[in-house]
Image: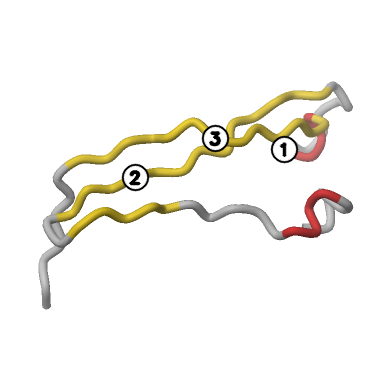
Amino acid sequence: MAEAKVKRMWALPGAELTVPRSLLMHGADETLVTVPCPSYLIEHPKGLVLFDTGCHPKVIDDAVGY
């Protein structure tokens, strides 16, 4: 099996998502909170990798459903 080694990794500032606390934690109130949505740049011996899971496009219309 090949061995993978990361040389360096950076958390990149990116988008922010503002949602009610109740979406993030059961029993929480509806106060809005802003959470970061970072992506990561990884330096590997074979090159650079951008890791960003992103969100489903429908999140903008139905955050609870997606």
For the C terminus, give its image quadrant.
bottom right
**Crowd rating for badge 3 (residues with CA inside 10 Å; few <14, some 14–19, many 20+):** few
Kind of residue sitting beneath label 2: Leu
Front one among 23 and 49: 49
The x, y position of residue 26, in whole percent, is 77, 38
**Crowd rating for badge 2 (residues with CA inside 10 Å; few <14, some 14–19, many 20+):** some
For the N terminus, give its image quadrant.
bottom left
Front one among 2 and 9: 9
Q: Residue at x 78, y 53 (%)?
A: 59
Sequence order check: which comes first, mark 2 or mark 1? 1
Q: Residue at x 49, y 52 (%)?
A: 52
Residue 31, picture quadrant: top right
The x, y position of residue 45, in whole percent, is 12, 56
Q: Residue at x 14, y 45 (%)?
A: 7
Q: Is residue 48 left or right of residue 20?
A: left
What is the C-alpha distance between the residues marked 2 and 3?
Answer: 12 Å
Kind of residue sitting beneath label 1: Leu
Closer to viewer: mark 1 or mark 3: 3
Q: What element carries label 2?
A: strand
Sequence order check: which comes first, mark 2 or mark 3? 3
Q: Which residue is drawn at 57% across and 38% down?
A: 37
Q: Where does label 2 land, which residue?
A: 41
Closer to viewer: mark 2 or mark 1: 2
- Labelled pair 1, 3 in contact (Cβ < 8 Å): no
What is the C-alpha distance between the residues marked 1 and 3?
Answer: 19 Å
What is the C-alpha distance between the residues marked 2 and 1?
Answer: 26 Å
Number of residue marks: 3
The x, y position of residue 38, in whole percent, is 50, 38
Q: Where does label 3 land, which residue?
A: 14
In the displayed image of the protein, which residue is found farthest to the bottom? Answer: 1
Relative height, residue 8 to residue 50 (above, below)? above
Q: Is mark 1 on a helix, strand or loop?
A: helix
